[in-house]
């Protein structure tokens, strides 16, 4: 077990969301779902990425310096502590309970049904790949796993995805977590068996803009769409 690797609580995820919203820029990570995808790729890829390399990428998708003007040292310390805790939890889960890994997706309510919306998470994953570098060495046989993630960030696929029924879309969403698990397993094996083949992280490039579904998102503090009268985070989000 990694130190400070307990899963984040809903209140802690809410705090991360509030900080990302408070200091957001045109090119920053916007919410906890996108941050989770970002972190998942960072801890899954071929290269070890240090905090001084990935932290600027939370606030900027290019070379500009968009680091927040933090309100207080305590605010910065809490945010960083929770991000590192979440990263350690992701490492612990992927290494020790790989098949139980769960992504932090956004959710939307439509017709009384809660749908998992993966776009932000997938965009964050591609962002993490770009920061870490080295993913171009992924064998072609793993392309299907990459496609399961990248398709939800491809503007050229937006119209086709919107034509699918919700069951088909949710089936596609269900393929993302197994894809992330398989990609982590591959790179972990490579790092363990061929440690000299892995180079330092490369300069990252901004990923493509995410596809946006025309559906209202359900926030963790919003009333649960099931009609229970409870907050979503205290009801169906569990």
Image: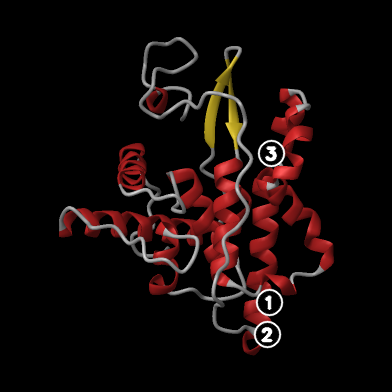
The location of residue 231, given as percent across then percent down, is 36, 21
Classify mark 3: residues with Cα within 10 Å, few (<14), some (14-19) or many (20+): some
Say few, some or many: other residues with alpha carbon within 10 Å of mark 2 (under 14 / 14 to 19 / 20 or more).
Answer: few
Does 98 appear above or below 195?
A: above
Residue at numbered disc 2: 194
Q: Are marks 3 and 1 in contact (CB under 8 Å)?
A: no
Q: Position of residue 218 (x, y in %)?
A: 47, 25
Secondary element type, mark 2: loop
Disc number at residue 174? 3
Q: Quadrant of residue 172?
A: top right
Q: CA distance from mark 3 to mark 1?
A: 26 Å
**Label 3: which secondary element:** loop
- At horizontal 56% and vertical 46% (from top left) the residue drawn is 121
Give the color scheme: rainbow, by chain, secondary structure or one colour: secondary structure
Give the Cα separation between the discs numbered 2 and 1.
6 Å
- Disc 3/disc 2 C-alpha distance (Å): 31 Å
Residue 72, image x, y percentages:
15, 55
Residue at image mark 1: 190
Along the polypeptide, which appears first: circle 3 or circle 1? 3
Vertical position of residue 5 compared to residue 118: above or below: below
The reply to whether discs 2 and 1 touch (Cβ–Cβ < 8 Å) is yes
Does label 3 or label 2 sit earlier along the sequence? 3
Give the answer, above or below, for where 154 lies relative to 233. below
| Residue 100 left/right relative to 32 | right
Q: Residue at x 66, y 70 (%)?
A: 187
Q: Residue at x 37, y 46 (%)?
A: 8
> What percent of the width, then of the height, locates residue 25?
39, 50
On screen, residue 179 versus residue 7, left or right, reads: right
Question: Helix or strand or loop: what does disc 1 sit on?
Answer: helix
Question: Can residue 102 be seen in the rendering of this structure?
Answer: no
Decide: is 7 above or below 87: above
């Amino acid at each position: 077990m990694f130190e400070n690797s307990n899963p984040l609580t809903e209140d802690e995820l809410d705090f991360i969301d509030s900080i990302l919203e408070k200091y957001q820029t045109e090119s920053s990570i916007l919410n906890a779902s996108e941050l989770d995808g970002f972190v998942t790729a960072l801890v899954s890829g071929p290269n070890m990425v240090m905090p001084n390399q990935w932290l600027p990428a939370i606030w900027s998708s290019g070379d500009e310096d968009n680091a927040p003007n933090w309100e207080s040292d305590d605010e910065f310390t809490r945010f960083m502590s929770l991000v590192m805790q979440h990263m350690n939890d992701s490492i612990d889960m992927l290494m020790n309970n790989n098949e139980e890994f769960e992504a932090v997706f956004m959710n939307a309510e439509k017709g009384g049904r809660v749908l998992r919306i993966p776009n932000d998470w997938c965009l964050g994953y591609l962002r993490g790949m770009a920061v870490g570098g080295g993913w171009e060495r992924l064998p072609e046989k793993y392309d299907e796993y990459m496609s399961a993630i990248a398709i939800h960030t491809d503007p050229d696929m937006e119209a086709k995805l919107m034509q699918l029924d919700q069951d088909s879309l949710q089936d596609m969403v269900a393929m993302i977590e197994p894809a992330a698990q398989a990609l982590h397993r591959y790179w972990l094996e490579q790092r363990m068996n061929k440690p000299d083949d892995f180079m330092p992280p490369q300069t990252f490039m901004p990923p493509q803009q995410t596809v946006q579904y025309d559906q209202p998102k359900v926030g963790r503090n919003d009333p649960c769409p099931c009609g229970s009268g409870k907050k979503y985070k205290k009801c169906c989000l569990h």
